[in-house]
Amino acid sequence: MKTKIKEYLGGKVFTSVIVGMVLLSLVFMIVQCIPYFQVDFTNKKMSTMLVGKYSVDGGEWKNVDPTKTINEHFHKVTIKGKLDETAANFSTLAFSSKDIWFTLRSADGKFEFSTRRSIPDIPEELFSPADRMFRTPGYDVTEILTESFPDTVLSGKQDMIIEVEYPYSMATLSFSDSFGVMYCQQDGLYNQLFFKSMPSFLLFVLVCFFGLFFFPVSSFVLGKVNYKYLCFGALCFFWGLYMITQSLGDFLNLWITDVTICLFTVRMMSYLFITTIFLYLKSNLQKPMTRAIANLTITLFFLSVIVAAVLHLTNVIDVTATRPNMFINTAVCAVIMIVLLCLEIRGNRNALVFLISWSPLMLTLMLDILDQYIHLAGSRFFNYGLAVTMAYQIVRLILDLRTQYKEAIRYQQVQKELYEAKVSVMVSQIRPHFMYNALSSIAILCKLNPDTAYNATVAFSDYLRGNMDSLKQTAPVPFEKELEHLKKYLYIEKLRFDDQLNIEYDIQATDFEIPLLSIQPLVENAVKHGVGMKEDGGTVKISTRETETDYEVIIEDDGVGFDVNKKKDDGRSHIGMENTKKRLKDMCDADVIVTSEPDKGTTAKVIIPKRRNTE
């Protein structure tokens, strides 16, 4: 039954999961690639709200179209022009700004709004740590009512000026990634959030769920803790969190009022996600040297993440200011991990395929890093490369899990077949042993008492004919069936020894199972080597009893006995007894305890645990 369940899980469920993840990946690609459908009466997202000209870093003036994005990198952008005529149809203008200050004012100076926070009027060297964060723009969402604009601005008779400043000197930023304006009615931001971000949000919540439960649980179901699956589970979880923060980046300030914490949340999610990428790459390394280098690399990278977090939280320097250093650290660590994977490729086709599967992410990551300095605009491709890479990894891991499930099922089947073959060999070793003793007894009776030998031959023939099928039994059987075999055997032995062999039964429990022909070798020893070796014969007693935890089968004789501490060197093979002990242990977890004293007799006790017998 368990095998059938595992086969079902390894087949239909895993196939469904693969198809589901592929479909979800396609949904993600569609959500990311198809432009958001704008509904004019609900809200409208624009790159700016002015129709006029703009200048980047004091350069030449260029025409600006509010419906088209400005992809140029900048430190300061000045936009001058008239308010877009459609803005007057909306009640609110929502400004989304990331890592930038912006100032909005009318040309006559009567209206002015700025996101720049006031800085204490003291020398900079006297700033407290908290004061330093006034220089951090963070992630901000600002709503301005259109009715607050002068009538001359709304009517298009007067120009407005927007100044956008990126305060960090170490690199530039793409304007379209840092600033945007949305025309909306009341609660328009929440409408935008629902229609734009909710599909991807739900998708990546599902990805987080898979990362948190599916792959770790699959690892445990396989019977051991699989480090690779745990790392990939963490990778999926933090990928989901990373994409959720990316999707909600324009709206975090709606719930998190501190703009620097919004910034910190988004940056830390990206750094933790990169850390889990490195951990997963390391989980695919096999050589001790490459794994040691990977551990050192990941540790140093994670320490740099901690340092950046501590510096931000202690108001020393924000995570945007440390971002160029983190880009360099990321690039160096990525190169090291790629080199380590390349070292594993020699003679390992799987390592080569694995490395190639990460090339979309690696290439787009490198482009994203270079984009900070040479303005390749590669950052817009990073999420696509990430989606392709992760979709492939998820499908590959699910297929790998399915293969391992099938291998586990096959392994259990093979183990069962091997065990049955082993039991069959053991039983085949016991059968000739029993038959040899029975025929020997009958042969002796042929000389001593032919009529009795005749009756014994008929009884032995009936025994073989009636129990031939039961000899094929390899699973434990009810004790009553074993007792039936035993009584027929003892009938034949009784014919042989006559009055020198007395048989007693004290059967108090029969509600348990035992391997077929497992008690008979113990009784054979009691008859042949105990009572049979005594001049005036003796008694063999077979008892069963039940305790709180066990069932016990006891074979006692008052024969010649032996010294249990001295190894018997009688020239005989004891394979029957050894096989009996092994079968009892393997099939019922039973123990055989033999006690004996010379000239007093021998007792063999079989102890069968109830728990294992119930299973």
Image: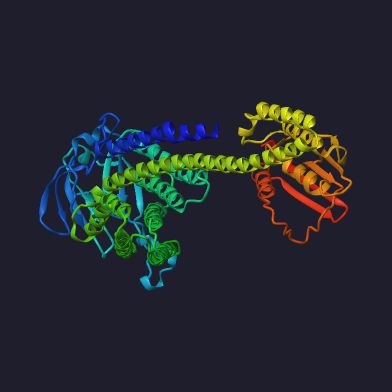
Residue 400 x/y as whole percent: 39, 44
Q: Nearer the viewer, residue 578 or 429?
A: 429
Specify the quadrant of the image occupied by residue 455: top right
Choose between 548 and 99: the one closer to the eye: 548
The structure residue drawn at horizontal position 67% and vertical position 38%, both measured from the top left corner, is 435
Q: Is residue 568 above or below residue 127?
A: above
| Nearer-the-camera pick, 167 or 26 | 26
Quarter where residue 476 is shown = top right
> In front: 476, or 298?
476
Compared with 301, 386 (above or below) is: above
Picture coordinates of residue 413 (x, y %)?
50, 39
Quadrant location of the N terminus in the rendered image: top right
Applied colour scheme: rainbow
Query: Is residue 418 shown left or right of residue 432?
Result: left
In percent of width and height, residue 472 lies at: 61, 33
Residue 594 visible, this orientation: yes
Residue at the bottom extreme? Answer: 125
Corner quadrant of residue 368: bottom left
Q: How many marks?
A: 0
Any part of residue 209 in sight: no
Give the quarter of the figure containing the C terminus.
top right
Apparent side of residue 568 relative to residue 78 in the rendered image (left or right)? right
Instruction: List x then y, in percent, for residue 527.
Output: 80, 44
Residue 61 relative to residue 433: left or right:
left
Q: Is residue 96 left or right of residue 279?
A: left
